[in-house]
Amino acid sequence: MAISKQKKQAIVSTFSDIVTGAESIVFVQFNKQTVANSNALRRKLRASDVGYKVGKKTLLKRVLSEQGYTGELPILDGEVAVAYSADPLAAAREVYEFQTANKGIVSIVGGVFEKGYKNQTEMLAIATIPPLQTLRGMFVNIINSPIQRFAIALDQIAKKNA
């Protein structure tokens, strides 16, 4: 069924608002998605403050071409939705978590990160970056490791001399 010109303009306007306000955008391909799966995905994304919008690819491409992103737009085959967030990692991470939990329903096909197009492999790498709290914990562990080893060595020397 054809979409009227006013409806197309409204969709383009919505996508323009999404693209200008988002730090990262993830192109999500969905196949054989039931209403229950779609609702579960939307709930999961909404809980993490990630938006999700389904629309025509031609209208999405029109909006993206006006933004002047670097790189090449990934191939968008099949049914494609857009997940977007003000947090640069949240959209990719949440879609990836849903993708791994529900094989074959949704998949990341690319996205926009730091004002440039990224392919599927690059977006999956971005999606697997740990959250900030985890990264801080890892950093503290790295800093603490030499101190801890030094304390163990001093303890062993003290036991040997005693």
Image (cartoon, rainbow, N blue to C red):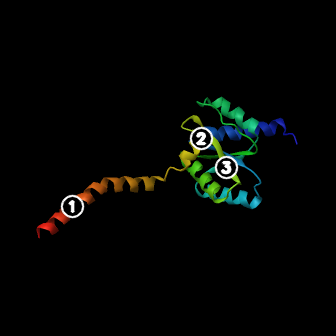
Whichever of labels 2 and 3 marks the residue nearer the N terminus, that label is 2
Distance Cα–Cα, label 2 vs label 1: 53 Å
The answer to whether 148 appears left or right of 73 in the picture is left
Distance Cα–Cα, label 2 vs label 3: 23 Å
Q: Are marks 3 and 1 in contact (CB under 8 Å)?
A: no
Q: What residue does disc 3 label?
A: 107
**What is the quadrant of residue 65 in the picture?**
top right
Label 2 element class = helix
Whichever of labels 2 and 1 marks the residue nearer the N terminus, that label is 2
What residue lies at 75% left-to-right and 55% top-to-bottom?
33
- Residue type indicated by callout 3: Ser
Q: Position of residue 39 (x, y in %)?
A: 71, 59
Nearest to the eye among marks 3 and 1: give it: 1
**Which of the labelled discs sits on residue 21, or is there none?**
2
Label 3 element class = strand
Q: Answer whether residue 138 is visible to the viewer in this image.
A: yes
Label 1 element class = helix
Give the camera-side residue of 30 and 50: 30
Q: Position of residue 81 (x, y in %)?
A: 70, 46
**Which of the labelled discs sits on residue 153, or is there none?**
1
- Residue type indicated by callout 1: Ala
Q: Answer whether residue 24 is visible to the viewer in this image.
A: no
Nearest to the eye among marks 2 and 3: give it: 3
Q: Position of residue 42 (x, y in %)?
A: 67, 56
